[in-house]
């Protein structure tokens, strides 16, 4: 019986490491979101992370003839992205992000982690270039 304890323990450690990687490091989706940056701040108790909210408008509302906005809550990866977003409050931004299955404290409070800023523009975008 003692012959099986070592291989079973190794298999259990490998299985637990795989589950941990799947839950916290597997990238479920990648993409780009655009909207007006509502707020961006550094917060947390033990791990201080950059957190923000992007407001996307123009989505169909359950009420006929009305529009509702959609919020995209995210965490930002790195101080270089944070420096750009700190100066972009209230502006139109396009953000590249990765979606993970679960957040981890040192990466941020959200499953969505912004990995890049594609564009920062004027907040009154109407589909036409701002002049």
Image (spheres, rainbow, N blue to C red):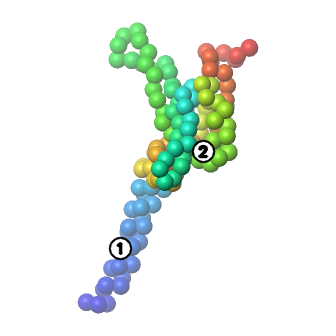
* Label 1 with label 2: CB-CB less than 8 Å: no
Measure how far apart labels 1 and 2 are at the Cα level: 33 Å
Residue 100: tell me if it is visible. Answer: no
**Horizontal relation, residue 131 to residue 8: left or right:** right
Q: Residue at x 41, y 61 (%)?
A: 20
Q: Quadrant of residue 23?
A: bottom left
Q: Which residue lies most toward the left here?
A: 1
Front-lying residue, 78 or 44? 44
Residue displayed at 40% across by 9% down: 65
The quadrant the C terminus occupies is top right
Task: Residue 15: give x, y in percent of width and height.
Answer: 38, 69
Q: Position of residue 93 (x, y in %)?
A: 62, 30
Residue located beneath label 2 in the image: 115
Label 2's element?
strand
Residue 76: assigned label: none
Crowding around mark 1 (Cα neighbors within 10 Å: few <14, some 14 to 19, many 20+) is: few
Q: Secondary structure at mark 1?
A: helix
Number of marks in the image? 2
Pointer 1 residue: 12
Please provide percent x and percent y for residue 120: 67, 29
**Residue at (62, 17) in percent of width and height:** 124
In the current view of this chain or complex, which residue is farthest to the bottom? Answer: 2
Task: Locate residue 38: give its quadrant.
Answer: top right
User: In this picture, is 7 found above or below 85?
Assistant: below
Residue 90 makes an appearance in the image: yes
- Name of the residue lying farthest toward the right: 131
Quarter of the image containing the N terminus? bottom left
Residue sitting at x 67%, y 40% = 83
Marked residue nearer the N-terminal end (1 or 2): 1
């Amino acid at each position: 019986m003692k012959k099986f304890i070592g291989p079973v323990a190794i298999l259990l450690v490998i299985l637990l490491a795989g589950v941990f990687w799947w839950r916290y490091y597997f990238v479920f989706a990648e993409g780009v979101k655009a909207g007006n940056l509502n707020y961006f701040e550094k917060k947390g108790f033990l791990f201080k992370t950059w957190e923000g909210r992007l407001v996307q408008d123009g989505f169909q509302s359950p009420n006929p003839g009305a529009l509702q906005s959609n919020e995209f809550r995210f965490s930002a990866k790195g101080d270089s992205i944070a420096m750009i977003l700190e100066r972009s409050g209230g502006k139109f931004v396009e953000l590249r992000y990765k979606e993970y299955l679960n957040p981890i404290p040192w990466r941020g409070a959200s499953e969505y982690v912004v990995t890049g800023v594609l564009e920062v523009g004027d907040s009154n975008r109407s589909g036409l270039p701002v002049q």
